[in-house]
Amino acid sequence: MSSGVLLLFAHPRPDLSNCNVKLFDAASATDVTSVDLYGTYPRYDIDVDAEQQRLRDHHTLVLQFPIYWYSTPPLLKAWIDLVLEYGFAYGVGGDALAGKRLLCAVTTGAAESAYGPDGVHGHSLRELLRPLERTAMLCQMQYLPPFALFGAQRVAAADALDPHTAQWRALLTRLNDPAPMPESALAGDSLNPGGQLLQMEGA
Amino acid sequence: MEGLLGQACLFLGAALICVPLAKRLGLGSVLGYLIAGVLIGPVMGMVGGEVTDIQHFAEFGVVMMLFLVGLELEPRMLWAMRSKLLGLGGLQVIGTTALVAGVAMWLGQPWQIALAIGLILALSSTAIVLQTLNEKGLMKSPGGQSSFSVLLFQDIAVIPILALMPLLALPELVGHGDHDDAHHGTSLLAGLSPWFKAVVTVAAIAVVVVGGRYFVNPLLHYIARAKLREMFTAVALFIVIGIAMLMSLVGLSPALGTFLAGVVLANSEFRHELESDIEPFKGLLLGLFFITVGAGIDSAVLFDNVAVVLGLTLGVMFAKGLVLAVLAWVFKVRGRDAWLFALSLAQAGEFGFVLLSFASQNAVLPGSLVSLLSLVVALSMFLTPLLFIAFERWVQPRFEAADQRQADEVDETGTVLIAGMGRFGMIVNRMMLSLGYSTVVLDHQSEQIERLAKFGVKTFYGDASRPDLLEAAGLADVKVLVVAIDDMPRALELVRYARREYPDLHIVVRVAGRMDVYRFYNAGATDIIRETFDSAVRAGRCTYEALGLHPYLSQKSAQAFVRFDQHLMRRMAEYWDDEIAPEDNPAFIEEGKRQVAMLDDSLRGKRGILHDASERGWVPPGELPQADQS
């Protein structure tokens, strides 16, 4: 088992997925531990102990999901509720995740311009995902800005997913390496190309 | 009588010695039979003139084979093949006839004889080719399908060719013609006016189609209710032989008639049962036919003309292969399929013998030419298995990569075989069909099948624990086998057989209780479903709710119970022994007692075992039981 990235993928309708399944398959071909949550727990009976052990075994957690109503799909929310337990992830004696990294790799329906003070959604993606950022903070994890594919349906329709897939693979390879990420990358709105990380590292 | 038994012993014995050996050496069964024939015929001289009679009898194997081929082919599929059938088949017959006749004329034959030779040699051997394609699993490949189309067209073409032959008769041969009409032209219709013949012919075909559709099925239901295995075999043989007889009476090809009957019955629920009943007869008769081909080689004529015969045989095969290769190119059959198509059909066939004797009876060909051409036909049939071997050795490996991709495509269609169509199997079947998965369903209760058919549910008749029937139903091609028959010993036998033959098959089995779970687990079932467990759990959940437990909590508790029960069952499995009855197995009983005690403890505890230790996250921190953090 890889001790680097643990990738948890949550999509309730993989049969209708335009991009996420392809991105998950691309990730599974790299050297990360990839888990299809809906495939593992089709009846929502999450094995908390096994999930916690998996977390202990990896230094970076990546959550991959399509954004629904500014949040995660329901099974991933249940996973967060049940697995990030008091005494394990937070609270007294709860430091199993301290120092590990958390990244959200998401897809959105709306174009990038919809995010930001002037966009339809009124806030940047990073701001909208603040609850997940706070979750990471409470678990003493290092939160990385989201890695996003905006306007996923349009990208799929234009058959233009390849550049994003390449960036995604490069990012996962980089994250498999426990070496700290550059400070400047952590402050940005996203880890997307154009964001600083991938340019700086020449990935 | 003794003569008959002696002959039977001789033929069977020769086959028993040669065929397994040939198969072992990778030569295929057809070559084995042919060699057996050569051994008892030309080499040891143990059989003589009676071979021709036996051959006529054994040709019935071809009739049976076409019935089986028809059973595999629904009318819809036959219709979809029509362009290949007419295009490929028609052009093959015309092209080969023209080429061979041209060469014969160039060699100095008059055009009538040349045309007759062309027509005779244009036909290929349905018996050898289909048998070998099936044996090597190439039947479903595009090359195999193209070959089959051509063979089918040829079988149809025999009828007009038979009609054409007398017109080619040469005046100078008429006096010498052999007018023995023992096998052909015994038609009831001889001497009747052509339009009357046509009416009777159409009527006979209508009898086969309408009878097959409306009469045979009720008959089979009636026989099935008698629950006598041999009666079923009898009725299957009756159908095939009866149709063959009807067709001969009106002067049509028996092979074509039974093929048609097969197609009509392809939608019948008794299809697999008929298949498995006819199959052994077909196999033996075809084997006998191949032996007679080997035994019928006239060594005297062969040794006198060895160079001529060999030259002619190779020439004919080359010419036929050439025509086929061109057709493959025109019809966009490519790569290994083009090779298979060209190599597999390059021989002359059993209809060649029929036409040769017919031609000599009708004063079309002189006797010396007939015996020479008989040798060419036999020799080309003899060489065909070698061409198949060449195909496997040298052609197949070159296209291996392409082959694998094809295999994947076929996998996608993966069907489900459901054994047992009671209430349980029916639900599984409905679920599969509702998502568009194709299923094959077997049940051995004729009444049940009839009842289901009224509701439009398609079920095949047959005892699912019989291996031959399972194979006929396509066990080799399905992805999942669902076993839902009530008779547990037979279900167990079925699972053991399927697991032994197909290690990768996914087997879902419905069982009665816990003890069966262990038995079927050891037999190799993949998923074992206790028939009452899930419904009992649902009943328990409803009872929880009725007692006032919150519906969501009821659901969660039921789920936790299932998990707990599975955990206990896995622990019990370690103490299970197939050889010892559970009540005589002290270790098994001991573990059972421990489990009962565990449940008692949990009932006395504060939360109980079912108040689920795995959803601590939704329990307020203050009420957490001490979590095990190992």
Image (cartoon, coloured by chain):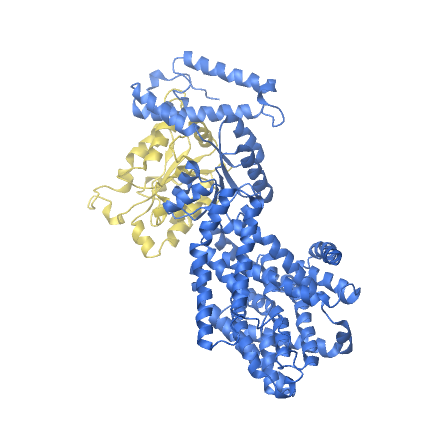
Chain colours: A yellow, B blue
Compared to B405, does B338 lie above or below? below
Whole-percent x, y for residue B10 in the image: 75, 57
Whole-percent x, y for residue B398 in the image: 60, 63
Residue B568, visible in the rendered structure: yes
- Looking at the image, which residue sits at the far top? B604
User: Which image quarter: residue B318?
Assistant: bottom right
Q: Classify residue B267 as left or right of residue A75.
A: right
- Looking at the image, which residue sits at the far right? B44
User: Which image quarter: residue B363?
Assistant: bottom right
Q: How many marks?
A: 0
Whole-percent x, y for residue B236 in the image: 54, 53
Identify which residue is drawn at 48% across, 49% down.
B220
Q: Nearer the viewer, residue B317 or B262?
A: B262
Q: Nearer the viewer, residue A46 or A109?
A: A46
Q: Nearer the viewer, residue B159 or A104?
A: B159
Compared to B206, does A175 lie above or below? above
Q: Classify residue A182 as left or right of residue B232.
A: left
Q: Classify residue A25 as left or right of residue B583.
A: left
Whole-percent x, y for residue B520 in the image: 55, 33
Compared to B441, does B119 lie above or below? below
Compared to B220, does B70 lie above or below? below
Q: Nearer the viewer, residue B254 or A161?
A: B254
Residue B147, visible in the rendered structure: no
User: Which image quarter: residue A69?
Assistant: top left
